[in-house]
Image: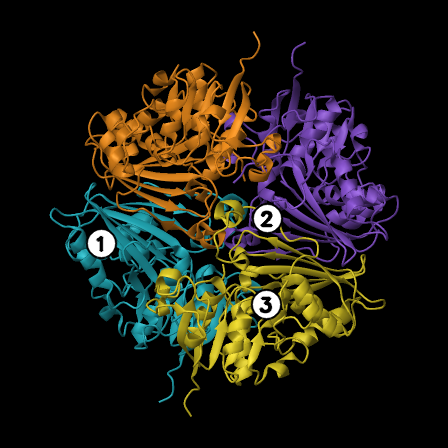
Chain colours: A purple, B yellow, C cyan, D orange
Amino acid sequence: MDRMTISVAVSGASGYAGGEVLRLLAHHPNTTIGAITAHSNAGQRLGDLQPHLRALADRVLVDTTVENLAGHDVVFLALPHGTSAEIAAQLPADTLVIDAGADHRLESSAAWEKFYGSAHAGTWPYGLPELPGQREKLRGAKRIAVPGCYPTSAQLALVPGFAAGLLEPHDVVIVSASGTSGAGKSAKTHLLGSEVMGGMSPYGVGGAHRHTPEMEQGFSNAAGEPVSVSFTPTLAPMSRGILTTATARVRPGVGAAALRAAWEQAYADEPFVHVLPAGHWPHTKHVVASNHATLQLAFDEHAGRVIVTCVIDNLTKGTAGGAVQSMNIALGLPETAGLDIEGVAP
Amino acid sequence: MDRMTISVAVSGASGYAGGEVLRLLAHHPNTTIGAITAHSNAGQRLGDLQPHLRALADRVLVDTTVENLAGHDVVFLALPHGTSAEIAAQLPADTLVIDAGADHRLESSAAWEKFYGSAHAGTWPYGLPELPGQREKLRGAKRIAVPGCYPTSAQLALVPGFAAGLLEPHDVVIVSASGTSGAGKSAKTHLLGSEVMGGMSPYGVGGAHRHTPEMEQGFSNAAGEPVSVSFTPTLAPMSRGILTTATARVRPGVGAAALRAAWEQAYADEPFVHVLPAGHWPHTKHVVASNHATLQLAFDEHAGRVIVTCVIDNLTKGTAGGAVQSMNIALGLPETAGLDIEGVAP
Amino acid sequence: MDRMTISVAVSGASGYAGGEVLRLLAHHPNTTIGAITAHSNAGQRLGDLQPHLRALADRVLVDTTVENLAGHDVVFLALPHGTSAEIAAQLPADTLVIDAGADHRLESSAAWEKFYGSAHAGTWPYGLPELPGQREKLRGAKRIAVPGCYPTSAQLALVPGFAAGLLEPHDVVIVSASGTSGAGKSAKTHLLGSEVMGGMSPYGVGGAHRHTPEMEQGFSNAAGEPVSVSFTPTLAPMSRGILTTATARVRPGVGAAALRAAWEQAYADEPFVHVLPAGHWPHTKHVVASNHATLQLAFDEHAGRVIVTCVIDNLTKGTAGGAVQSMNIALGLPETAGLDIEGVAP
Amino acid sequence: MDRMTISVAVSGASGYAGGEVLRLLAHHPNTTIGAITAHSNAGQRLGDLQPHLRALADRVLVDTTVENLAGHDVVFLALPHGTSAEIAAQLPADTLVIDAGADHRLESSAAWEKFYGSAHAGTWPYGLPELPGQREKLRGAKRIAVPGCYPTSAQLALVPGFAAGLLEPHDVVIVSASGTSGAGKSAKTHLLGSEVMGGMSPYGVGGAHRHTPEMEQGFSNAAGEPVSVSFTPTLAPMSRGILTTATARVRPGVGAAALRAAWEQAYADEPFVHVLPAGHWPHTKHVVASNHATLQLAFDEHAGRVIVTCVIDNLTKGTAGGAVQSMNIALGLPETAGLDIEGVAP
């Protein structure tokens, strides 16, 4: 049989997430790119908006409408939070819809309403196949919610410990440094190069960040009990990448060997998540532009805590790569199809 | 009376710390710069080693010897850790010796020996005047140990809470992002621009960092009970600056207002430490090249923790600026002499 | 006699140029800062707009009106090009008005109209005292046009050769790399950190850049004949700094020694412009935040051309520092007053 | 027939050029990677030296010897300049040897000896297939000299004009800004992140740069007459990328339309070189990690010069990508095999 070919539509193509989906799909062995849509930029050449995508430079963007998106095997939604649910509801039930926005990530309607202030659109299968049992839930799925970039790194960092019952559910502290592309492509003064180059700053400190309930959802599901998280995001002077430092109190009697074993076992067969050998530290540059996550853990016996550092590319494994990986699983393609690319360093 | 004039010698002048001491002293209204010393770079023009110091470009470095350093009112030691004690011991007792290295920071000989593996040289008055009661201990001092850059930011972040009895002594978590100048000027592959630009990485994770006992010393002294800290340093793609995110469990019954009051009160009269108005976040660029620290705090009620973010310039307030500030206090000069400079932004 | 004290008003204080003027004046020994004005940001605290200016954090901005600006000894205008002339015309004749904008730089009304498309407001004494004979013209002046940042670096690079008659007036090629602060603080997508970090691009290529006639004016005045320039500006991933590479055909018979002698002689007594020793290259970091310019020259005998590289901080020597230096000269103050600051490196 | 499979050995695998060759070959559809060799790093895991190359992490480096390199269909030499000739001479004549070093680039033995100070090893077919007639010379070749990164960008920028007889052979001026990876992975103080981040500097100014004769060779061959170049390389604060600004005097009577036509025609069928639409500027970020070059040209009628700006990734099109492209041509593979990858932006 010939190679399976899947038609794909990509919305939000003028933004960073949509551009990254296109970068990956442009050379995916099983996809052909159909409609490429945008809102205010409809009618323009992709080459004028995403000049790095040479292979698609002459494609012209069309409006983000149900009409333009329907009729494809797969539809990627890379739209502002709160706007994808309406469009998704109108797409055929047998179309695979992959939402890179937040609308369908949370299981708790109460949490959604608290953090987003609108009615909850419902919960879709969660596109982080490395969670325990999650890969099975994605096979054959027709709706997939792509995790947020911070929650991807945080859950990869700590879920193995919660799933193995090694960590206390309180005093979990997560501090992440993100590249500026995570803040999007809208022109804002505080995101100007002049403002961000050469400096670091926190933002959204104190429990208010919308990604906190998503992290707690993943940890609580793994732990089988409610887990609470203190999360602080910071902005780093780089375009791409997230470095997450996640620490949690270790249960009494748990030592360094048991910790390492739990993480290594959890990711032993994962194609994209790698526990580094002792003495090696993850670096965001090592995974930039790839779908890989690398992590290292240390047991701080003195403080009774495990410290896990995890790096991803926020746009790849943290958004578009995770989306393509989930698509592959849902459609029964090899999980690494279109994602067998190395990080770009130096 | 004429303006008081103090002769100063600076050792380690070819490194980043020594260069920063010279940058500040070059325009200090009360100092004249005497011997400028180095080890392997002795004999060279300062202009060839620190080309930004135009005012001192034609000065020639001499060897770092007791002979060259003695005979000044003040001697700054910016030498590798473990090497300053021997020289300091030979300098006259009435010379003000300010050691930017670690040798005399720790009060506990056991902690020194554990982390540095050599005999402890003794404890000097600690050059962080913003600590409770510390300013008094520096007046008239003849030996001053300049704090480490990470401990400066960490102690500024959390000491007010410990001193006011608002924080639990366990599960203190500190994650800092530092500019690369903190790693020094020695040529190492992993510090090459090609390696660090555009990426972030952790290092020394898991309790091993030598700055941890210094932080715990400051917190324990303030709290009146032993405090344990989990500290993770990370390297950010910027030359200067530290962003420290410090979080601690809040004692039962303590709320947001009491927390903010404690910090604001602690720093109300400080010339260099500033609690930002609510809604404003500190940014390392706002303090670069200045002796200022700015911080913000938030009460994460959900997690029961306070989160304090603090920024300094690691070379200024974190090293050379703190050293000059301490010198001013020790000598009875205005505390801000030579330090009334703004941050350089954008 | 007491120290002379001059009252100063600064307009455009929420932008990069206005902020830099304030950074320098905050510690100028002879000035007191009066009105600080802005357009849309009037009514806000300076600390909210320029958080690095701690010394002025609580000052509140007022509207940029003639009423608010009048009544000071000196008024700095840091306004959009084309808007300063109208305000300047209404300020008292005995007020020293220093315009950081372009309105009064060009001597040729035809050139102004061609490049700016409006009526020419007239020509003011040009605030680049290092030009031959220019310092004299600034003494006692009441109106000063601050040079553009690119023309400052370009004229410092090549004027000594033109003034000495060593260079041909054609095939002058100038390529400059500028930090992004030169493009201002308005939020634009192509200036986002995500877009500029890690990359370089040209812009305005092909003779269209408005700074070209200003360069040609300076060169032609020095050469005593019309000089034509090909100028290409590029945007570099840094906040501050300009590196200008300027090359020109050398007249027959002129050799390396004559070239070096001309430049060294031109700047021998300049406090802010320095020809580096052979073998040393200028680096923008060495002059960042200072009013210094450093340069190096080489005779490419093979190509028959001199290559001069010159670095400045675009906001300091290229704008606000040059403005303060000119103010000092105009008022009879020491030329370096308030500018005796070193570059900030690393 | 099955897909053609070619065995490849890569030397110098611990450096930046060798690492980039491996990044591209790891997913080339027609190659299998045999020996991976290094000098002082032999015996180590590739994952410890090039952590971004996850697909090859467990491969162990062997010594760079003729024995280890022989027996492959293709051998890539990514060795220090002046060291490849000796090894190449001992490899079988029917092995395709691709030298990323300088040893075999120059046609003139005199030029080699002047700039490198050793005996010339001879001239190999030059791996820049976009030069007129060059693609044919690479088909079936068994020895290929990969161009330098600066000369790649410079020749792509100006050769169309010389080949079409539109440019004068004198007063060609080229200024390039390169990312720091072009300076290699050896630890040197002036290449530390602390030194390079946030600043720009020139180096090797005045005709001394070894890449000048290589540029002149390409221009002279295209023009049919000797062309002389003034070349200034500068170091930009980014890991990868070259922006070259190349300007030349236009012959009398040549106008903008003829210029544009010449460049567009020259690259009309090129898969990797693209003349941008008018009004668009090349940006190094748009080609990073890809084998593409983009360029724009402008006719500065006022100065009588054409200005061409061209961007490449110095490690990809400038080194490893150009090497793979040449390999593809030499072996009769599709020219874009293994190179159909997009730039990574933002």
Residue C228, horizontal then vertical, whole percent: 22, 46
Please tell me which residue lies in front, D114 or A155: D114
Would residue C227 be visible to someone looking at this image? yes
The furthest residue to the left = C253
Residue at the spot of label 3: B102
Of tags 2 and 1, the one toward the viewer is 2
Disc number for residue B65: none
Name the secondary structure under disc 1: helix
Residue B20, horizontal then vertical, whole percent: 47, 67
How packed mark 1 is, by other alpha carbons closer than 10 Å (few <14, some 14-19, many 20 or more), is many
Residue at the spot of label 2: B200
Alpha carbon separation for disc pair 2 and 3: 26 Å
- Relative to residue D199, is residue A45 drawn left or right? right
Alpha carbon separation for disc pair 2 and 1: 46 Å
Q: Is residue A257 above or below residue B204?
A: above
Q: Chain of mark 1?
A: C
| Total numbered circles | 3
Q: Residue, x 48% and y 62% (percent of image)?
A: B16
The furthest residue to the right = A225
**Of the image marks 2 and 3, the number of the one nearer the N terminus:** 3
- Relative to residue D141, is residue D192 drawn left or right? right
Name the secondary structure under disc 2: loop
Q: Residue, x 62% and y 35% (percent of image)?
A: A12
The amino acid type found where label 3 is placed reads: Ala
Q: Residue, x 50% and y 50% (percent of image)?
A: B188
Name the secondary structure under disc 3: loop
Marks 2 & 3, CB-CB < 8 Å contact:
no
Residue at the spot of label 1: C219
